[in-house]
Image: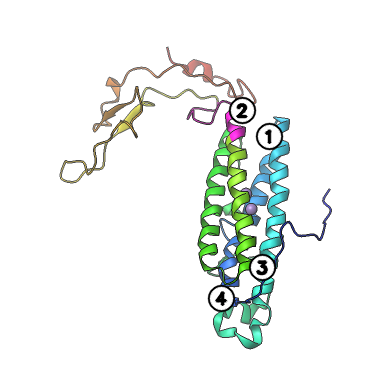
């Protein structure tokens, strides 16, 4: 059940209304990195998760993202108010569609559920969320650079900061599953190519930059010959402490290395 408190999460006090900036702000209302995308992504994901603490965290953050959507909508409303008569030339979008937010991004493209990244595995979803928060953080940074007044800048700084916090929360959730810095998850063990770096992009046979230890981990091998897979050896032992449904993929045990 949802109820709605009309109190905003952070004050919205626009002193220099700017319909062109309102159009930029649409990116965080009906855009790919926007608050509607984040809210629906975490909300839908929460129904797949069996870990009660992580499910509750996803729902907490989803509801917060709806509160961010409200703040972004208020910013757009205040920046586009009066645009129709006085400043239509600054944004044809608001002149035609009217003031306030619409389910469009800053270029006028309609919001789509294809922006939502969810499905099937809690590790997969949490990693998608770290990417989503990075996208939101980046868009807010771009918007902050163009903010036309102090009140707008303060509200954007709050929204920006919360995305950093959410990133930390998703990283902690992954850490609690032992999956913050381990690429393997799920029930399917990888084959013998898992520790191979395919060094395939070259200029006249030469590397622009040799793959060094920063990118090629210990135990990883480099080859420029992806065809010679028979020489690659056995995969390492597969450890999967996090899976919420161990053995959920019947028959996968036979694929286990060794
Ligand atoms: Mn947000
Ligand atoms: Mn967020």
Instruction: Look at the picture and state if 73 lies above or below 43.
Output: below
Q: Which mark is residue 176?
A: 2
Question: Is the Cβ of the residue at disc 2 closer than 8 Å to that at disc 1?
Answer: yes
Label 3 residue near ligand 1, CB within 8 Å = no
Q: Is residue 121 visible?
A: no
Residue nearer the viewer, 145 or 86: 145
C-alpha separation, residue under disc 3 versus residue under disc 1:
31 Å
Question: Is the Cβ of the residue at disc 4 closer than 8 Å to that at disc 3?
Answer: no
User: What crowding class fits label 1: few (fewer than 14 Cα within 10 Å), some (14-19), or many (20 or more)?
Assistant: many
The residue furthest bottom is 85
SS class, disc 4: helix
Which residue, given by chain and number where applicable, does mark 1 sit on?
54
Instruction: Look at the picture and state if 164 lies above or below 237.
Output: below
Which residue, given by chain and number where applicable, does mark 3 sit on?
75
The residue furthest front is 150
Which residue, given by chain and number where applicable, does mark 4 sit on?
20
Question: Is the Cβ of the residue at disc 3 closer than 8 Å to that at disc 1?
Answer: no
4 vs 1, front mark:
4
Q: Earlier in the sequence, mark 3 or mark 1?
A: 1
Residue nearer the viewer, 38 or 213: 213
Q: Earlier in the sequence, mark 2 or mark 1?
A: 1
- The C terminus appears in which quarter of the rendering? top left
SS class, disc 2: helix
C-alpha separation, residue under disc 2 versus residue under disc 1:
10 Å
Identity of the residue drawn at 57% across and 36% down: 171
Q: Earlier in the sequence, mark 4 or mark 3?
A: 4
C-alpha separation, residue under disc 3 versus residue under disc 2:
37 Å
């Amino acid at each position: 059940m949802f109820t709605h408190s009309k109190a905003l999460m952070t004050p919205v006090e626009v002193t220099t209304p700017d319909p062109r900036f309102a159009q930029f702000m649409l990116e965080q209302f009906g855009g790919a990195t926007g608050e509607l995308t984040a809210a629906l992504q975490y909300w839908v994901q929460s129904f797949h998760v069996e870990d009660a603490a992580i499910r509750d965290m996803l729902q907490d953050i989803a509801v917060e993202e709806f509160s961010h959507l409200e703040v972004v909508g208020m910013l757009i409303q205040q920046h586009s108010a009066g645009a129709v008569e006085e400043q239509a030339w600054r944004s044809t979008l608001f002149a035609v569609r009217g003031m306030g937010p619409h389910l469009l991004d800053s270029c006028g493209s309609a919001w789509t559920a294809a922006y939502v990244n969810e499905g099937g595995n809690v590790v997969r979803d949490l990693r998608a969320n770290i990417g989503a928060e990075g996208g939101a953080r980046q868009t807010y940074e771009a918007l902050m650079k163009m903010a036309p007044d102090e009140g707008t800048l303060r509200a954007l700084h709050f929204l920006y900061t919360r995305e950093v916090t959410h990133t930390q929360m998703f990283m902690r959730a992954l850490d609690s599953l032992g999956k913050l810095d381990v690429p393997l998850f799920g029930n399917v063990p990888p084959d013998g190519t898992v520790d191979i770096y395919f060094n395939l992009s070259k200029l006249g046979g030469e590397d622009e930059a040799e793959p060094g230890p920063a990118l090629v981990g210990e135990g990883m091998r480099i080859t420029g010959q992806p065809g010679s897979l028979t020489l690659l050896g056995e995969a390492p032992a597969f450890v999967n402490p996090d899976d919420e449904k161990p053995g959920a993929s019947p028959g996968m045990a036979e694929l286990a290395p060794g």
